[in-house]
Amino acid sequence: MDTSHLIKTLAKDARTSDKSVGTLMVWACVAASLFAATVFALLLGPRHDFAAAAETPRFLFKFVATGTLAIAACTLVPRLARPGAAPGWRAALLAIPPALLAIAVATELALVPAAEWQARWVGTNWLVCLTFIPLIGIGPLAIFIAMLRRAAPTRPSLAGAVAGLLAGGIAATFYAAHCFDDSPLFVATWYTLAVAILAAAGAAAGRLALRW
Amino acid sequence: MDDKELARLLRLGMAGDETAYAAFLERIAAILRGYCRRRTGVGSVEPEDVVQEALLAIHLKRHTWRQDEPILPWAYAIVRYKLIDAFRRRGKRVEIDIGDLAETLAEPAVETPHERDVGRALEALPPVQRSVVTSISVDGASIGETAIALGMNETAVRVALHRGLKAIARRFGKD
């Protein structure tokens, strides 16, 4: 088939009803949040002293860390989904959650006696954290990968990894409402590891499923 | 090439104007051809194959162009992706400089005759899609003529055409 024939053929399929990347992204975010909320409600649920905990800064900070991660990743995914839309300076947004965590860890180390560091770092829930953040996040990750398949990521592994960070941010936000380990030492270690698992899964899924 | 004119044609095309869309594809093909020819050596990657893959990709991914943004950076990112993919399939590692966005010189719209990858992919389609795509591409029939010749309704022809084009595009990058 020569190119002029190909062009005539494509022209006959001119009209498109495919949704824009922005629209796809909104629906993926809604679906992913509902999915994560459902899995969270079925498997864990919020901690029983949620209302009292909501008045303590350590508990609230967990949502600041996970929320900024979700927002930063959420602004990057649509850009990685469109050809020629380089993330540019927005990539730096991903440095905000680690920076906040670093400040929080330094503050915690300054406030808490060294003898307590280890107990707060390991906590009581680290295995629960490493299990349930990936478990809550894997469905949202699949949703974002499916959304990216309908778009056109020119860097599939990177797009998948950032989708993993987004799924991790959403999952960790829900998980934080359940977990009793509020120390930044715990969050910086175990939440980070759990989110990294999702980011690695996303990168692998991107390499396998996002070529077009 | 005026980006605004390309954007106007593509907007019309996405709304269903086949003539405007064909004009858009002709112009973008000439730009892609220039891009590919400058980056492929003799005997490695056939530039016209990449032009066709990129045209298919532009077609199937046209909803990823934001209508308020320029066309050319988007189109160059797609052809660059397809060119790297073509080199990779042939076992070569390449780095393609993206500092080419200013190059909008188009090559003359001629190509050398050659059995294209797209043509070969067409051979592998399921029978109905293959008949529809062949009727429209090789025989140059319209949707209506194809519908009558194959005893289908026009909607079914449009669906088979779209699915056939998607299936052809999917065959690339998998071998």
Image (cartoon, helix red, strand yellow):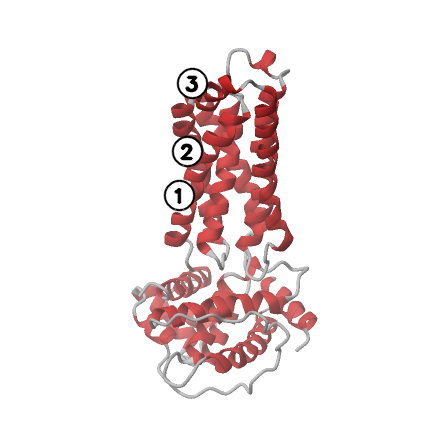
- Say which element carries label 1: helix
- Which amino acid type corresponds to the residue marked 3 in the rendered image? Thr
- Which amino acid type corresponds to the residue marked 2 in the rendered image? Pro
* Residue B32 drawn at (x, y percent): 53, 76
Q: Which residue is mark 3?
A: A124
Task: Give the numbered dot on residue A134.
Answer: 2
Between discs 3 and 2, the one toward the N terminus: 3
Q: Is residue A21 above or below residue A15?
A: above
Q: Foreground residue, B34 or A12?
A: B34
- Which amino acid type corresponds to the residue marked 1 in the rendered image? Ala
Q: Foreground residue, A58 or B45?
A: A58
- Say which element carries label 2: helix
Q: Is residue A101 left or right of residue A128?
A: right
Q: CA distance from mark 1 to mark 2?
A: 10 Å
Q: Is residue A85 above or below residue A193?
A: below
Q: Residue furthest front?
A: A114
Asked if residue A8 can be seen in this view, the reply is yes
Do tag 1 and tag 2 residues touch (Cβ < 8 Å)? yes
Between discs 1 and 3, the one toward the N terminus: 3
Q: CA distance from mark 1 to mark 3?
A: 26 Å
- Say which element carries label 3: loop
Q: CA distance from mark 3 to mark 2?
A: 18 Å
